[in-house]
Amino acid sequence: MQAMSGRSLYLGELEHLLLLAILKCDEHAYTVPIRAMLAEQGGRRLSRGALFTSLDRLETKGLVRSRMGDPLAERGGRARRYFEVTAAGLKALQAARSALATLSEGLDAVLESPLESKT
Amino acid sequence: MTQRPPVSSPPQLARRIIGRLISDDRWRDVALGDLDEEFRDVAARRPAWRAGLWYWAQAGSFATHGVRQSLSSFLAPAGDGPIGSVWRDIRLSARSLARQPLVTTVVLITLALGLGANAATFGLVDRLLLRPFPFSNVDRLVVLSERAPNSIGDQGTVAPANFLEWRQQVSTLGRVTSTLWWDVNLAGGDRPERVQGHLVSSNFFETLGVAPILGRTLQASDEVWGQHHQVVISEALWQRRFGGSPDVIGRTIRVDGETRTIIGVAPRAFAFPFGTDVWGPLAFTPEQAANRGAHYLTVFGELEPGADIERARAELSTIYARQKEAHPEPMRTRELIVLPFTTAMVDIGLVPILGLWQSAALFLLLIGCFNIAGLLVARGSDRQGELGIRLALGASRGQIVRQLLVESAVLAAAAVPLALATGWLALRVLRDSMPAKIIPFVSGWTELGIDLRVALVMIAATGITCLVFGLWPAISVSGVTPTAPLREGGRTMTASAGRSRLRRGLVVAEIALALPLLVASGLAALAAHRLANGPQGYEPSGVFQMRMILPAATYKDADARRQFGRRLIVRAESVTGVEGVGITSVIPAGVSNQTRRISIDGVPENPDAPVEVNYRAISSGYLQTMGIPIHSGRSFAAADRDGSQRVAIISQSLAEKYFATGAALGRRIRVGEGEDAWTTVIGVSRDTVDDWFISRRVPTMYVPFDQAPTNTVNLVARTDRNPVELAAGLRHALASVDVAQPAFAEMPLRDSLHERTASLRLVAGFMGAVGALALLLAGVGVYALMAHYVGQRRHELGVRMALGASTGDVLKLAVGHGMKLAAIGIVLGLGGAAALSRLIENAMLGVIALEYPLFVAVTGLLLIVAFAASLVPAARASRLDPTVLRR
């Protein structure tokens, strides 16, 4: 729980989802697949502008870092921007997850019974 | 996926727009790259147009994202400084106002109407009174006039000899110029035309700083008598008659039977004075140039640099005193007046009308403010809980007042554009409802609108308004003790005594303000109705009129004019449908007047108070055709002609003023000088209303047209058909007398009367609208108060009903409360209306006096509205179940 005391590590819901999506995309984590992942698996349709703003914010907080790829013909000679979760980002995710787990303890009956479990 | 069709490229424009929308270079490349990449996919699966559309949608998404970003950064709290906290208050207010859409809407509509009415009236005052003339040097121009006391329709104009001397002698004025009314007939072309002209001194255009768009304006040599055959024409006339042709300079034009050369075209929209189309040089014969007794010039000049109006006044009065000493007789009763141009040239009748409008608009705004203040106090009472908690949590009273004030300011700011739009619309309606014929006489009318000046004044007025309706409630509401609302479990039993006193006071004030406003509206409506439909002293229905001005070049002497009159009457009488025909030099509800100084045989003359009367030359059939009865004596007959005994008919008012009852007949009156000017009174006629504003029951004298033929001839013909049917026949009759003579003002007399009263109908319409709004606002005010009063007393009413009070008792209690307030307001309002009555009568141009039935009617109307407004909430309360009320 001590991680939660750091103010910069506090995660908004969208930030939380974004970090997870980046992790899931792994080495293909550039803007297009991240946005697609968020829409398909996170249920969040984000405008490109909002995506860029949020990624910028995560980078400022030091939770992710980015690098430019090589120029590509199908992008009109432009490069892709790849994202990677930093150690701090990972820490924040873990903290949030453990907080969730602690809080959810003993609530299985409530949280699971009425809904079908999702994969 | 196996065989990809050829890929189209994204729309270039959309791509460029997106490029512009993203300011960060790196992100711009990423965005465009992403879109290219995805576009290939989309284009592979969909037709090209769908892919294009998709790309455009992405551009749209970037745009909305951009707007939202900048908005939210704009709305973000700006730190903890004073600006930041005001900003927070504004956001808080916007949110709290949005939570009560009904109150907010009512307040916004009230402000839009109240401020809009003021924007419109201020727009009028600004354009018509403060700066009606567009000349760049208008502040340096002064008008000089010789005023004569006791003259009818005091024009205060100047005699030629005096003007000519001033022009040479005055050093404080750089240029002195003069104008003279000059109605002209334009001949040639397909049809003769009557246009407005003015004869002007050669330096007229330079004095006003106006340069021609074609040719030249007048020069000193044009002013010499005998060489004065030039004209400058207006741009409008140039387009209308000459198709805007540039070779118009040097062409000749027949003006009043004279040939004149066109030397210049005035710039577009310049038509000073009074919609002038033709300016001719003002030249004087030697006799005219020496005349000091006939005052007919309008004179104005431009102050020399460094001189002010006081110095000009001082210098001119010295000159004038010298002139008076040298020529005592014609100038004895005159005095010299020097006034700023705008003051002198603005129609004095406008001042009381616009004054009335502006004050009516202010009253309306005040009523609106009281209404809004009442609503805000009520809202504040409902928010005692919230505010009490904020105080308890450490907010200072100042902070709470500030937040409440900011709420008012947010409302006011939101109302500004609405108010300006309302004002613009009101001015539009006003502009369109003014008859085209009157517009040239109201300088500035065509420029009416909401401009930056009006907008700025309105914004300032809105600020003050906001304090009026916001400060009081804010202070009153913030006077809550932090614990009181909490102790009572968040429910207020009754509003604190001070607050409800304030609200009651506001409603009383609203009614007190609405009453004089309604009285004024009622008066305006009555006056307009009476003007158009009331007794005129003659019978305007069934009469057709047309006007001719006989040019001096064609009709050189009295005999030519006399023959024209006789022949015209004979021809007109034979027109089918005509039952009676008459001619007159001046027609009621016309635009001109004629007055003469008279002497009465046996009444000593008082040189300081000469007797001046309205003077008309009429044919023998005129009085009968117009339906003006003879009270005693006889009307003119065919035998009263040139060479026979000179006779006159006088109006009742003239007879009463200077003769004992019934003693006027047979007495003699002299018009002008000389023994042959004596006429004998043979009849006394009923008075007529020639012009409701300046000449009602003005002593009037009629002489036979045959004995004193004038060059202005108004033909009137009576019929039992629709008078319009006479038009063609009368025109034909005129053509058979003189084919080159144009006629104008051809219309039924009723229509002419209607036109003359248009301005008063406009006043009535505006006042009616303001009165109706005031009544509505006062009604809403009473309703809101009563709804709140009943709402806050549900508990008490419930107890009363449970204890056996009937529905009627509850109704009586609640309605009685409302009516008591209305009664106090009405008493105060009646006092106000009585105190303002002189002002209201003046604004109505003395057309109508305050009348008690109107007071009674207005009082009744207000009582009914107040009754209805209190009954509805009271009835709702009395229908409720007592147990519900008590909960």
Image: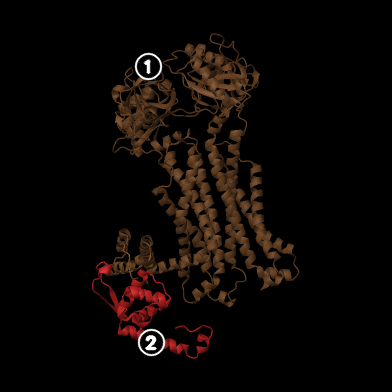
Using the image as rendered, state which of residue B854 and residue A96 is in the foreground: A96
Q: Residue furthest front?
A: B3
Residue B483's spot in the image, x, y percent? 54, 76
Colour of chain B, in one word, is brown
Task: Give the residue at x 45% y 25%.
Answer: B333
Q: What's under tag 2, amino acid-wise?
A: Ala
The secondary structure type at the circle numbered 1 is helix
The secondary structure type at the circle numbered 2 is helix
* Looking at the image, residue B174 lies above or below residue B62: above
Pointers 2 and 1 in contact (C-beta within 8 Å): no
In the rendered structure, the residue with mark 1 lies on which chain? B
Using the image as rendered, state which of residue B430 and residue B144 is in the foreground: B430
Q: Is residue B758 left or right of residue B782?
A: left
Colour of chain A, in one word, is red
Q: Is residue B91 among the parts visible in the rendering?
A: yes
Q: Quadrant of the C terminus of chain B?
A: bottom right
How far apart are the two marked residues, 2 and 1, measured between alpha carbons? 112 Å
Residue B561's spot in the image, x, y percent? 49, 14
Task: Give the residue at x 45% y 64%.
Answer: B406
Q: Is residue B595 among the parts visible in the rendering?
A: no
Q: Is there one chain holding both mark 2 and mark 1?
A: no
* Looking at the image, residue A53 lies above or below residue A109: above
Q: Identify the image quadrant of residue B63.
A: bottom left
Q: Can you identify the residue that label 1 sits on?
A: B287
Task: Using a 10 Å C-alpha cutoff, classify the residue at mark 2 as few (fewer than 14 neighbours), some (14 to 19) or many (20 or more).
Answer: some
Q: Quadrant of the N terminus of chain B?
A: bottom left
Q: Is residue B118 left or right of residue B530?
A: left
Q: Is residue B516 left or right of residue B2?
A: right
Q: Can you identify the residue that label 2 sits on?
A: A95
Q: Residue furthest bottom?
A: A106
In the rendered structure, the residue with mark 2 lies on which chain? A
Q: What's under tag 1, amino acid-wise?
A: Glu
